[in-house]
Amino acid sequence: MLWLKAFHIVFVVTWFAGLFYLPRLFVYHATATDPAGIERFKVMERRLLAIMTIGGVLAAIFGISMIALSPAFLAIGWLRLKLVLVAALVGYHVWCGSLVRTFRADRNRHSERWYRLFNEAPSLLLIAIVVLAVVKPF
Ligand code: HEM
């Protein structure tokens, strides 16, 4: 169980590196005007999305393995709420994927400021999920 938890946390960190950095790339990409720079952002975004997807899938596999080993987890309130927040995080990840495709087609319509706000969501979810997982308040 502890090995599963250790690797769960390793891949959560990998996933979050992308969830923090990809929207940052969107902030800079939204204001870029030179064609070479724009093409470079597209490559960076595509590669980062691939790496963070692998991180997210492995974090989920290790998390689900812990539940499979000890199904009683599913009866605990904080874990249920955590899974709801994780579902929101997966939705954010999918949204990032669709924004990567929009940028790739040169069809971005959001401002730099919009992406700065968009960039805040994973921080809030990270704080809430880690507090639930560590403090286990209910
Ligand atoms: C499908 C997604 C996920 C599942 C099924 C899952 C499930 C679990 C389970 C069963 C544990 C063991 C809890 C215990 O031993 O008390 C755990 C621990 C933990 N999870 Fe997740 N988790 C998921 C995603 C996440 C995410 C996205 C984060 C961070 C934002 C996260 C952060 C943590 C932390 C920090 C711990 C260690 C808590 C501790 O023992 O102190 N998990 N997770």
Image (cartoon, rainbow, N blue to C red):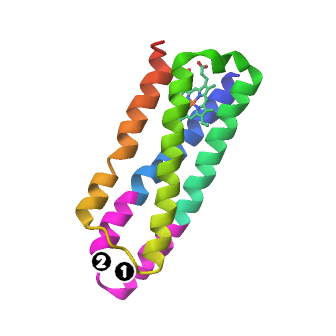
Left/right of residue 113 with respect to residue 132 in the rendered view: left
Left/right of residue 49 with respect to residue 137 in the rendered view: right
- Mark 2 = which residue? 32
Q: Which badge, 1 or 2, comes first in the chain's sequence?
A: 2
Name which quarter of the figure residue 107 lies in.
Answer: bottom left
- Mark 1 = which residue? 37
Give how far apart the Cα atoms at labels 1 and 2 are.
Answer: 7 Å
Residue pictured at 38% horizontal, 32% vertical = 127
Camera-nearest residue between 31 and 108: 108
Q: Is residue 131 above or below residue 54?
A: above
Q: Are marks 1 and 2 in contact (CB under 8 Å)?
A: yes
- Which residue ends up furthest to the top in the rendered image? 138
Amino acid type for the residue under numbered disc 1:
Gly
Q: Is residue 136 above or below residue 94?
A: above
Amino acid type for the residue under numbered disc 2:
Ala
Tell me which image quadrant ligand 1 sits in: top right
Residue 109 spot, x, y in % from top left: 33, 73
Residue 16 spot, x, y in % from top left: 47, 45
Residue 92 spot, x, y in % from top left: 46, 50
Q: Is residue 108 above or below residue 121?
A: below
